[in-house]
Image (spheres, rainbow, N blue to C red):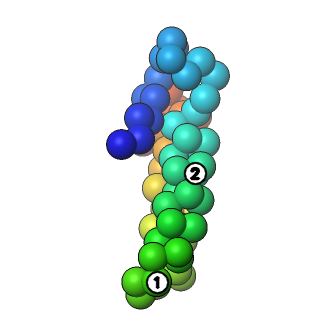
Amino acid sequence: MIRIPFSRTNKDEEGEKPSEVFSEYCRDELERRRDTGVGLNEKRFKAAVDLVIKRLRTMEENGGKV
């Protein structure tokens, strides 16, 4: 399971933003799903990831508020 830090003061992952951690996770997950051979709508997957990353970055810039 992935841990996404929701504050910049997380002692375990100092300096990592939630959007960066989530983006790395999604890159790995996309590759894993490609390798399974199960049907994957990559266009939809990428659109969903882009939406979440955009919202996470907005929260990061606004101190946790959307």
Pointer 1 local density, CA inside 10 Å: few below 14, some 14–19, many at least 20: few
Q: Quadrant of the N terminus?
A: top left
Residue 32 is situated, as x and y percent measured from the top left of the image, at: 50, 66
Where 22 sits versus 8, above or below? Answer: below
Q: Is residue 57 at all visible to an observer of this figure?
A: no
| Left or right, residue 64 beside residue 14 | left
Residue tagged 2: 23
Amino acid beneath label 1: Gly
The residue positioned 52% from the left and 37% from the top of the image is 18
Q: Position of residue 27 (x, y in %)?
A: 59, 59
Q: Residue at x 52, y 75 (%)?
A: 35
Q: The C terminus lies in which quarter of the figure?
A: top left
From the top left corner, tell me how far across and down residue 53 is, in percent: 53, 53
Residue hosting label 1: 37
Question: Image quadrant of residue 17?
Answer: top right
Please name the amino acid that badge 2 sits on. Ser
Identity of the residue drawn at 61% across and 29% down = 16
Viewer-closest of 17 and 30: 30
**Foreground residue among 12 and 6:** 12
Q: Quadrant of residue 36?
A: bottom left
Question: From the viewer's perspective, is residue 39 above or below residue 46?
Answer: below
Label 2: how many residues lie within 10 Å, few (<14), some (14-19) or many (20+)?
some
- Residue nearer the viewer, 21 or 56: 21
